[in-house]
Image (cartoon, rainbow, N blue to C red):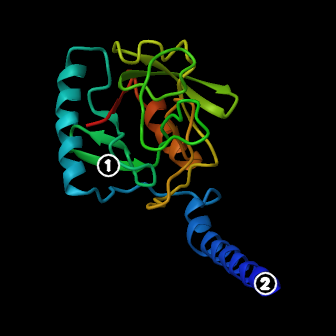
Amino acid sequence: MRLLLKLLFTILLMVICISLFAWFFWYKPKLNHGKPIAFTKPMVDAAFASVIRDKAEEAKKFIQQKNFNHTLCFLVDMKIESGKNRFFVYDFKRDSIISAGLVTHGSCNESWLNGRKFGNATGCGCTSLGKYKVGSSYNGRFGLAFKLYGLDSSNSNAYNRFVVLHSHSCVPEGEVSPAPICQSLGCPTVSPNYLKHLQKLIDNSNQPILLWIFNE
């Protein structure tokens, strides 16, 4: 019995050591919150790139009829796992993705949501799919944030649910797949440096920017 306990203790110690090693030498460096990041044109899987380009074409037709920024939009593909970049800035003039970052999805009030679920009810804690108008900035619970106005029946309660675009230190600056990232209560939450990047685009825009969250 004593030998078995000693063996179990040794195995547990090895697991802890391996986990700490992985944290300091693989995961932690990817957080990189202290360093400025240059968000250059990202590499995107061909299958996802095709979906994003199709969505961009739909977005372009939509904003041409509205008072939105006609040069760029924000696209979030919830089919992509959370440890990979899935928040994309799409430039219509270049007809390409010009930057990408990690973004959370809602936990639907669960301690940890496996997969993705979506909802629009007040208090659901889920991500709401659909088009959003990115509104004005303010300083809230998590610092800088941008108000979001849902434009579809699937996200019509976004403003009343306080679903906003903001950052949190739990979101790494670079991809960590196959590991997942943290979850939110429905807000599209990005890393601190990526929000600074988005802030420049939003602040320099004379018209509202379209944010489209989809799962296709």
In this picture, is 29 found above or below 33? below
Residue sitting nearer the eye, 78 or 149: 78
Q: Quadrant of residue 9?
A: bottom right
* Left or right for 131, reference 17: left
Instruction: Measuring from the top left, give residue 57's x and y in whole percent.
Output: 17, 33
Q: Residue furthest bottom?
A: 3
Instruction: Measuring from the top left, give residue 138's x and y in whole percent.
Output: 62, 24
Q: Residue furthest right?
A: 2
Q: What's the amino acid at mark 1?
A: Ile
* Left or right for 9, reference 177: right
In this picture, is 52 found above or below 1? above
User: Which residue corresponds to mark 2?
Assistant: 6
At 51% from the left and 40% from the top, the residue drawn is: 113
Residue 179's disc number? none
Q: What's the amino acid at mark 2?
A: Lys
At 55% from the left and 64% from the top, the residue drawn is: 30
CB within 8 Å, label 2 to label 1: no
User: Which residue corresponds to mark 1?
Assistant: 98
At 22% from the left and 35% from the top, the residue drawn is: 56
Q: Quadrant of residue 20?
A: bottom right
Quadrant (top left/top right/bottom left/bottom right) for the N terminus: bottom right
Dot 2 or dot 1, earlier in sequence:
2
